[in-house]
Image (cartoon, helix red, strand yellow):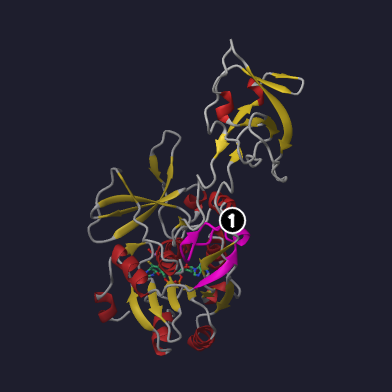
Amino acid sequence: MTDDTRRKRPAFDEALRIVAAVTPRAPSERIDLDQALGRVAGADVVAVADYPLADMAAMDGVALAAADSLMASPETPVDLPLRGEARAGAAVPIVSTGAACRISTGAVIPTGYDAVIAREYLTIEGDTLLLTQTVAAGRNIRKRGEDAQRGDIVLPAGRVITPMIVGALACYGVTIIDAARLPAIRIISTGDELSGPNAIHDANGVMIAAMVRALGMNAPDRFSVGDDPASIRTILSHAAATPAAILISTGGVSVGDHDHIPRIVAELGGKVHFHGVTMRPGKPVMFATLPNGALYFGLPGNPVAAALGFRFLVMAAIRAMFGLPPEMGIPVAIDLPPRPDTTVVLKARHTAAGEIEILADQRSHTMRALLTADRWITVDGEGCRSYPLLPVLG
Ligand SMILES: Nc1nc2c(c(=O)[nH]1)N[C@H]1C(S)=C(S)[C@@H](COP(=O)(O)OP(=O)(O)OC[C@H]3O[C@@H](n4cnc5c(N)ncnc54)[C@H](O)[C@@H]3O)O[C@H]1N2
Ligand code: MOO
């Protein structure tokens, strides 16, 4: 790290802002609604049909014209002959006033009728309905278009598609939506220690791939390379020449004799936006744009730092690509000393008593606390904020 880049080391929030600011918006693509779960609407979604599609029965029972019940009372019951049946999905029967027809929930109300009496409240003798009280017009009827009308904007661009949204859009006749295109992501694990006699397991590669998949995105391509500059240059220049929106490497970004990534990225023509952030863990993290426009994140090798680098910095880029607002975190009152010069990110979890427990081991190479953690707590000069453990879009 040169003195120059060290001087420019941004604060955590500033680094998130820089990432969002330089990230280009993803183009939209048309996708089937049943493939849309977890995707982000790339344009306003408009109802294709009224919902309900027509005035329909909300109960199984009998449909009639409310006006025919006007004179009905227990003393002067009104008799209406029962003629025909309206069934959900079937052709709507032609009916006449002065009569009633059987109807099932979801059946279209026959023209001329405007009320439904639920079968529990019916008095039927043979083929005759006995009305002993008046019925209000509109009773037990779902009105056409009362939930959505054709042409209504039912979902604004930028909303994450949940299962309930899939259901609602299907009701509104939507079968295809515009969704922000998913970025192709490539992960490069670096370090001589990933192979050879005392090899460690490549935790960072599988972990980051798993976080990508937890977002509902395709499994990223993964590569592994040692610490020698020629091999790193070869794999980075190959990666930089192949279309991918986001490249992520882990390891080799600190100040050690074998930490070559920042220099090679610059030699390849990458524009380094920052190298180093005043955060812990994750301090040596690097962010650049490659000449082909791909974003490059050089995450530190320690697994907690790599996890945080993806969870916060890469996520800031993914959110910006999809047009989502930056994550703010939820301010929480925790008795921790403020950290005016850095942002410390802590592994934490909710206790059964509803409090937030800061877990015991906060070192950046130990993972045990992450087996039970359910959130991150950040501490800076302003106080504490809580963030979900996993990357989220919504
Ligand atoms: N003199 C200094 N030394 C270090 C500093 C510093 O400021 N001055 N920063 C420390 C911090 S903080 C971190 S984080 C690490 C980051 O260093 P690198 O990104 O260069 O990572 P490496 O040195 O290659 O590896 C660090 C650590 O992580 C392990 N590792 C690497 N890759 C993987 C992987 N794929 N899966 C699991 N574990 C991995 C590696 O074996 C090392 O133990 O630098 C500090 N040093
Ligand atoms: O960033 Mo390092 O991850 O503090 O250990």
The residue nearer to you, when weighing 130 against 24, is: 130
* The image quadrant in which ligand 2 is located: bottom left
Residue sitting at 34 percent across and 56 percent down?
328
* Residue 388, x across and y down, in percent: 43, 51
**Does the magenta run of residues contain 101?**
no
Residue 267, picture quadrant: bottom left
Q: In which quadrant of the rendered image does the N terminus lie?
A: bottom left
* Residue 228, x across and y down, in percent: 50, 84
Left-right relation of 296 to 144: left
Left-right relation of 193 to 323: right
Residue 37, picture quadrant: bottom right
Left-right relation of 157 to 138: left
How many numbered marks appear? Answer: 1
Q: Which residues are magenta?
A: 28-48
| Residue designated by label 1 | 173
Whether residue 200 is visible here, answered yes or no, is: no
Q: In which quadrant of the rendered image does the C terminus lie?
A: bottom left
In this view, 290 is above or below 382: below
The residue nearer to you, when weighing 378 against 77, is: 77
Residue sitting at 50 percent across and 47 percent down?
372
**Does the magenta run of residues contain 32?**
yes
* Residue 118, x across and y down, in percent: 63, 27
Residue sitting at 59 percent across and 31 percent down?
65
